[in-house]
Image (cartoon, rainbow, N blue to C red):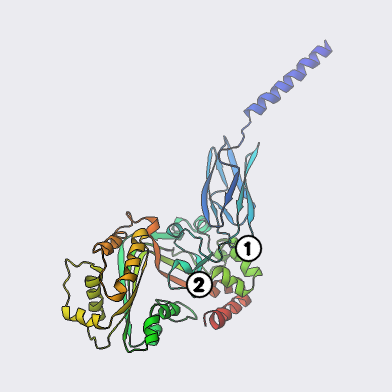
Amino acid sequence: MKIEYAVFTLIGVLSLIACNSENESHVTLETSPTMNLSAACHTDTLRFKADESWQAECDAEWITLSSTEGCGDGILPIYIQQNDDDVSREGVIVIRNSHSKVSVTINQSDNDNNGSPIINLAKDCGLGWGYDLNEDYADIAGIRGQIFDAAALKNDYGSEAIRIDAHASTNMCFEKAQSSTQLQSEIGGKVSGEVDIKVAKAKVSVEYNKQINEQKDRLYVWCRDARIVKLSYFGNDVSLTDRDVLKWCTTSSFRKSVKNDKVEDIVRKFGTHVVTSSYLGGKLDYYFTVSQDIKTEIEKVVTTINVKILFFKSSSTTVDEKTWTEIKKDFQGNFVVTGGGDTGTILNRQMKEYASKGEPLTDPTLFEKWYSCFESPQTANDTDLAMVDFTVIPLWNIVSRMDANKGEKLKDYIVKVYLK
């Protein structure tokens, strides 16, 4: 009897354990346990099932979790910073409750793009990225490594930490000078602090190269027609030089570079300045020369070129034929179209083939088609968008708050050597 009783007792205990085990709540992962990513920054979502409260943690500083705890089935947005290190990296996210845990391993490759931008411009706008002012002003070619983590800023300062305004607007700028050198001082040059240029000095030399080599007296004119559909900027509550912001909301790659790299390598990875607002859309730059005998206002000269060469608003705009005759006497130009996708590419090609010689475009509707790409933020395609304007602050303003000595060395190198 004692043996039988013992057997029945053991069976009962085992049954109770089995029953309790079946009733325990487990975390079940519904997304892949492994993610292999490029060096660009990414946003993604982890999905899992859980019947009770859960906690999430990550062993990598370059991965930002939107939440570290919750209850019930989970949807966990994650943000992976751009990898500006010279090596690949691995991070593990663990989600657990009181009975079980699951993990997701994220492998991110190193940035082997040889300094070329890897940013998704339409999505991230370049806001918080480094910028190299040796490149042209407000151009994707100048974007370098990521400095500020947008997801971390939103976690700490709310959704208004990153602001995006979507509305269509037009901005036109004009400058003229009696020589290319004078024009460079007006719209180009190098800076030691805040940016006050409109076109990089090197860009002026390239676009007016033919006229400069001819050494003939001309009136040098630059005009930019910018079509803007999106503006991105930091909220008023975000101070980029605040020590807490720099400690918790900068990227792992940037903090590591400030700590370990020489100033030359910091500039190579992150440029000379930091983008604090970014305007996206399309732009058309006019670089042309005309006779110095022309006394007509520059705005009227540009309007005449628009009507006679580009056919822009030709049906509603009249021009002075005498002005056009004066322009044609000694006109040489270069036009650069940025943005607009395939339409912009075609327009740019036509500009170089015809407009640069003062000849009208073969397709009278081409400029209007390009313009229509930016009529509305709702109709503008991501592939059409380019950076057309921005505001920046010197990179050493940021670095100096993290390491005063390194910041001073960085400033000396950028101002006295790199941008000299």
Dot 2: few (<14), some (14–19), or many (≥20) neighbours within 10 Å? Answer: many
Image quadrant occupied by the N terminus: top right
Amino acid at the residue labelled 2: Asp
The x and y percentages for residue 317 are 17, 70
- Secondary structure under the numbered disc 2 in the rendered image: loop
Question: 163 and 290: which one is in front?
Answer: 290
Sequence-first tag of 2 and 1: 1
The answer to whether residue 271 is above or below residue 62 is below
Residue 229 in sight from this viewpoint: no
The answer to whether residue 350 is above or below residue 300 is above
- Say the numbered circle drawn on residue 132: 2
The x and y percentages for residue 373 are 31, 59
Dividing the picture into quarters, in which one does residue 185 lie?
bottom left
The x and y percentages for residue 247 are 59, 64
- State the CA–CA distance, disc 2 to disc 1: 19 Å
Amino acid at the residue labelled 1: Asp
Residue at point 61%, 62% (across, down): 85
The answer to whether residue 48 is above or below residue 143 is above
| Residue denoted by label 1 | 86
